[in-house]
Amino acid sequence: MLQQYLEELKKIPLLSREEESRLWEQDAAGDTAAHQRLITSYQPLVFKLAMAFRLPETQTLELIQEGTLGLLEAAETYDYRKGVAFSLYATHRIKGCMYDFLQQEQKARYLSLDVENEFGRTLAESLPSELLGPMEIAERHALSEKVILAVGRLPAKEKLVLEGIFIENRSIAEMAELIHVSTGHIYRLQEQGVRRIRGMLSKFMQEFKKD
């Protein structure tokens, strides 16, 4: 799968400095196509940073997936007018997402709710039965319901991709093979789906903060 992903990356044309500047201007004006092209053109950067960790293929593919989320976040907050190269700006966020993923994975290996302590009790048994108060629980449930409704309103392919990646823990490469498209197309569907959900939830979140 990693080799297949690499082959897809080789097909991505390099952008000249002038072309990239024009795309950022178009992106700032709300041009979705320009935004998607910029994201695609920086996929090789994600690949390069993931490969530097020298991990097995499965973990590398997961790092690429996490790094792509960092790339998407960087693109949403980047201001080309400040004169900072996007490659430098995005690298920090991409690496941050990769390190967070590795730290969580490491914790999962050594911390289990089923491991007994010196008193013969598991961590699950030692935790308080109610970590959240009634109001907090109700708020979490309300937000979860809104997210579920938002996902259900997505176009079929975007819904399939988000459920596959975030619920079924499938990799980008697996989703590409499943629906017979390129990995780049999966990234675009993922980004579009996340953007739609954020848009649908924005009004609810504003009301939520007021309360």
Image: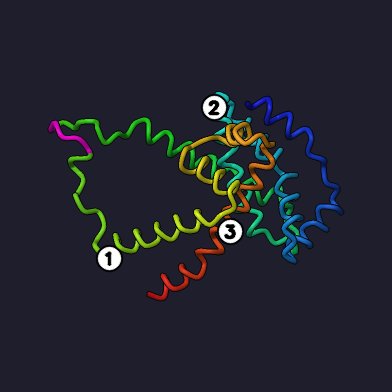
* Circle 1 Cα neighbour tier, 10 Å, few/some/many (<14 / 14–19 / ≥20): few
Provide the major secondary structure of the magenta segment: loop
Dot 1 corresponds to which residue? Answer: 135
152 left or right, relative to 93: left
Mark closer to the chain start, 3 or 2: 2
Three-letter amino acid code at disc 2?
Thr
- Can residue 195 be seen in the rendering of this structure? yes
Residue type beneath disc 1: Met
Q: Is residue 78 magenta?
A: no
Q: Residue at x 37, y 35 (%)?
A: 108
In this view, the mark in front (3 or 1): 3
Query: Is residue 30 positioned above or below 66 on the image?
Result: below
The numbered mark, 3 or 1, whose residue comes first in the sequence reads: 1
Disc 2 packing (10 Å; few <14; some 14–19; many ≥20): few
Look at the image and give the residue range highlighted in magenta: 119-123
Between 156 and 81, the one nearer to me in the picture:
156
Instruction: Kindly state the secondary structure of the residue where label 2 is placed.
Output: helix
The disc at residue 58 is 2
So how many labels did they put on this image? 3
**Mark 3 belongs to which amino acid?**
Arg
Tell whether 207 sits left or right of 25.
left
Residue 196 is tagged as 3
Q: CA distance from mark 2 to mark 1?
A: 40 Å
Disc 1 on helix, strand or loop? helix
Element at badge 3? helix
Crowding at label 3, few (<14), some or many (≥20) Cα neighbours within 10 Å?
A: some
Q: Measured from the top left, where is residue 177 in percent x and y?
A: 62, 31
Quadrant housing residue 49: top right
- Relative image position of residue 173 (x, y in whole percent): 61, 33
Across and down, in percent, residue 207 comes to 44, 73
| Residue with the most extreme bottom position | 210
